[in-house]
Image (tube, grey):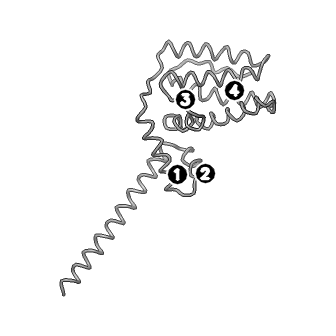
């Protein structure tokens, strides 16, 4: 056979190998992101035009998070925040809108202390989604109810559900070893 045929076969082989390797790396990236972000992966995918765009967004979140110096809360801080949560929750029966607003503020404090940036809401949610993807949707739902309550459009039941959403994120932010009372929201 002529030399040019061997060269052509080698070029085609290199292209096939490159496509297989690229496909494998792409699948591995998708699996890694889906495992890390869970339902947040699916939500981001639905809100973008393509899988590539969604994965680029999630990868950018992860890279941003790696640049942050997030420290775990101390035991004293967890105890202090747990006591504050109990006060917020106990106010709900008499002042549901006030209680919901205080829950939102307390969640912000619990995010701020370990070092999460306090940019706009969407950036906070994106930052939280890297470390706590299973509860970031609770944060979004709590914010939605808070906005409705601020414009007097939320019912007491809506506000109760908002407080439940905030509590899910609050407990996750405090950490697995916290002893937050899981009492029912009135």
Establish if 14 lies above or below 44. below
* Cα separation between marks 4 and 1: 30 Å
Number of residue marks: 4
Q: Nearer the viewer, mark 2 or mark 3?
A: 3
Disc 2 to disc 1: CB gap under 8 Å: yes
Left or right of residue 67: residue 121: right
* Cα separation between marks 2 and 3: 23 Å
> Which image quarter holds the N terminus?
bottom left
Which residue in the protein does label 2 denote?
Answer: 47
Q: Quadrant of residue 157?
A: top right
Left or right of residue 100: residue 121: left
Tag 1 or tag 2, which sits nearer the N-term?
2
Dot 1: element:
helix
Which residue is painted at 38% across and 56% down in the image?
Answer: 25
Which residue in the protein does label 4 denote?
Answer: 163
Dot 2: element:
helix
| Percent of width and height locating residue 68 | 43, 31
């Amino acid at each position: 056979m002529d030399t040019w045929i061997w060269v052509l076969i080698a070029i085609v082989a290199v292209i096939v190998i490159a496509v297989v390797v690229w496909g494998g790396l792409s699948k591995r990236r998708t699996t890694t992101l889906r495992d890390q972000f869970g339902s947040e992966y699916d939500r981001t995918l639905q809100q973008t035009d393509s899988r590539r765009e969604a994965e680029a967004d999630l990868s950018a979140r992860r890279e941003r998070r790696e640049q942050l110096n997030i420290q775990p809360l101390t035991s004293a801080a967890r105890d202090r925040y747990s006591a504050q949560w109990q006060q917020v929750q106990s106010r709900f029966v008499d002042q549901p809108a006030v209680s919901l607003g205080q829950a939102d503020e307390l969640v912000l404090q619990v995010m701020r202390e370990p070092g999460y940036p306090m940019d706009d809401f969407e950036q906070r949610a994106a930052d939280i989604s890297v470390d706590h993807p299973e509860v970031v949707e609770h944060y979004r739902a709590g914010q939605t109810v808070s906005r409705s309550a601020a414009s007097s459009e939320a019912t007491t039941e809506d506000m109760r559900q908002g407080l439940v959403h905030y509590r899910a994120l609050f407990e996750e932010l405090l950490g697995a070893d916290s002893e937050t009372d899981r009492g029912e929201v009135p």
